[in-house]
Amino acid sequence: MAFNTNFSRTGVQAGAGSLDAGLRAYMCRVFNWMALGLVITGLVAYGVAQTSLRALFFHLAEMPNGAIVLRPTLLGGISIFAPLVFVMVLSFGVNRLSRPAVQGIFLLFSAAMGASMASLLLSYTGVSVARTFFVTAITFAGMSLWGYTTGANLARLGSFLFMGLIGIILASVVNIFLHSSPLAMLVSIIGVGLFTLLAAYDTQRIKITYQQYMAYAGPEEVAKLSVYDALTMYLNFVNLFQFLIQFMGVRSDNKD
C-alpha cells in the first residue's frame, strides 16, 4: 500500500495510534470469543461426563484381553466428527454467511467439542485435567504474547508447521490400525511442539493481517473474521491441551 508522504508527523502519529487502538480492540475481541468457546466446551464436557447424559455418548466395553475401555455410542461418534463439519462450514463459508450465522456456528462447534472431549474427564482424574489446563493456558498465553510482540518474522515457519500438521494427522490415522505406543508418544511430543509454535505463529499472522487489511474493512466483515480467528486460536489451545494431557494426565480408575 502506498502512503502519502505529505502527511504531517502529527497526522502519521494519530493514524498509527488509531491503528494500534483498533488492533488491540480486535485482538481482545478474538480472545474473548476464544475464551467463550472454551467456557462452553468445558461446561458441556462436564455436563456430559458428570450427569446421566454420559450414557448417551459413551459406554464401557470389554476388550479381548479383559480390559475395560470407554467407547463412544452412535451419538458419541457423531459428536466426535461434528466439530470437523462446523470447522469446514466456517472455513469455506465465513465470507458468505451472516455475522449471526458465523457466531452461532462457532457456539455450536464449541458445544460439540465439549461433548466429544467429555471422554477426557472420564479417562483422567479431575486434578490432572485441571493441572494440564493450567499448564496449557500458561504456555499458550506466553507463546501468544511472544508472537504478538516479537520482531522476528514467523511467516517463514508456515510451510514447516503445515507439513508438521499433515504429518501428525497421517501418523494418527496410521496408528489407529497399528496401536503403537511409541508412535503415539512421538505424535504427542511433536504435537506439543507444533501447537506451541502455532500459538505464536497465528497470533502474529492475525496481527499482520489486521494491520494490512482488516483495519480498513467494514464492521460486519471484521466481526465475522474475528470469530474465524478465534476458531483458529481455540483449535491451537485445545490441541495443545489434548497432547499435553498424554504426558501429564493421571488415568482414572473410576469408570462407574
Image (cartoon, helix red, strand yellow):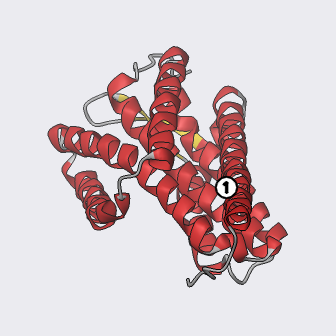
Q: Secondary structure at mark 1?
A: helix
Query: Can you see residue 78?
Result: no
The quarter of the picture where residue 160 lies is bottom left
Residue neighbourhood size for the residue with mark 1, other residues' Cα within 10 Å, grouped as few (<14), some (14–19), many (≥20): some
Q: Please indicate whether residue 252 sits to the left or right of residue 42 in the image.
A: left
Tell me the residue at 52%/52% (across/down). Answer: 235
The residue at 30%/43% (across/down) is 193
Give the image location of residue 183, x and y in percent.
Answer: 18, 44
Q: Is residue 251 above or below residue 86?
A: above
Type of residue at label 1?
Asp
Reading the image, the residue beneath label 1 is 20
- Using residue 14 as the reference point, say whether residue 54 is left or right of it: left
Q: Please indicate whether residue 38 sits to the left or right of residue 65 in the image.
A: right
Q: Is 30 located above or below residue 208 in the figure?
A: above
**Where residue 9 sits: x, y (%)?**
67, 64
Return the x and y of residue 210 as percentages of the image width and height.
61, 66
Which quarter of the rendering shows the C terminus?
Answer: top right
Residue at the location (51% across, 17% down)? 254
